[in-house]
Amino acid sequence: MSPRPTIPASGPLISPSILAADFARLGEEVRAVEAAGADWLHIDVMDGVFVPNITIGPQVVKALKPHVSIPMDVHLMIAPADPHLEAFAEAGADIISVHPEAGPHLNRTLKRIRELGAKAGVVFNPSTPVETIEWMLEDVDLVLVMSVNPGFGGQSFMASQLPKIERLRTMIDRAGLNILIEVDGGVTAVTAPQCVAAGAHALVAGTAVFKGGAQAYAQNIAALKSPVLAPA
Ligand code: DX5
Ligand code: ZN
């Protein structure tokens, strides 16, 4: 049995979402967040069908790969996802996360992601039940809990998802499996400690990392790692 993940003493892993970066200077932006202490790089892939927005594809992942040494955490908001898994893996994605609603055979998709050499993630929309992965825990490396409806950065955190993080953490701990819990959407210095208290190991943050320009990135990331629970 693999060891269960724990939250490092330095705080949760921070995965800045490049959706909030300056798209005209992406290479510079990703180098800056890595230098500022980012643990992973979160890449939001949207197709204008599964979610109402269109962002980037595997070519951008490939172009950014040489600019960072931290893992590339690719969040696919596309349907179907299966025909594109190989392209993202070849482009350098280290983690590939898919929404169960994007295709009929989640387990096949997860197995394929691992076959391609990446970590397999399952994304929970605010309405996706935790039981979705109950019978395939062994095939999951990461769960990504959406704390907003996917499609846009800059939305408000849905506190209704905190009990879902707790439920997933209990399910994973009971199974004794090495599955990381990551939270995505509206993560700020106020909501980050709530996510960690509920059981999250990793946090995605776009707006909260990229605000204030490059000179603020280190301070912004440090604020998200701080274990201090602010009063509600
Ligand atoms: C939403 C994306 C998020 C988003 C986070 O669909 O999956 O990763 O960019 O942005 P903030 O941190 O601004 O809510
Ligand atoms: Zn995302």
Image (cartoon, grey):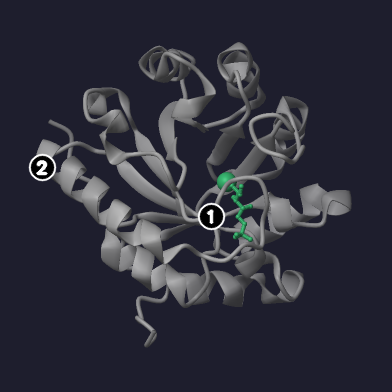
Label 1 or label 2, whichever comes before in sequence order: 1
- Residue situated in front as seen by the camera: 167 or 73: 167
Q: Quadrant of the C terminus?
A: bottom left
**Residue 139: % across, % down:** 30, 23
Q: Does the beta carbon of the residue at mark 2 sit less than 8 Å from ligand 2?
A: no
**Which quadrant: the N terminus?**
top left
Percent position of residue 134, x then y: 22, 30
Left of 115 or right of it: where is 164?
A: left
Q: Identify the image quadrant of residue 131.
A: top left
> Which residue type carries mark 1?
Val
Outermost residue, front side: 127
> Would residue 218 be visible to someone looking at this image?
yes
Q: Give neighbour class at mark 2: few <14, some 14-19, many 20+ (Cα, 10 Å).
A: few
**Which of 87/183 is in front?**
183
Q: Secondary structure at mark 2?
A: helix
Beta carbon at label 1 within 8 Å of ligand 1: yes
Which residue is the site of mark 1? 148
Q: Is residue 171 left or right of residue 66?
A: left
Position above or below: 55 against 37: above
Disc 2 marks a residue whose amino acid type is: Arg
Q: Position of residue 21 (x, y in %)?
A: 75, 57
Q: Is residue 1 above or below residue 33?
A: above
Spot occupied by residue 92 in the image (x, y as percentages of width and height): 61, 28
Q: Quadrant of residue 11?
A: bottom left
Label 1 to label 2, Cα distance in Å?
27 Å
Residue shown at 18% from the left, 42% from the top: 171
Q: Nearer the viewer, residue 54 or 110?
A: 54
Q: In what element is the residue under mark 1?
A: loop
Question: Which residue does the numbered mark 2 point to in the structure image?
Answer: 174
Image position of 24 (left or right of 160): right
**Tags 1 and 2 touching, CB below 8 Å:** no
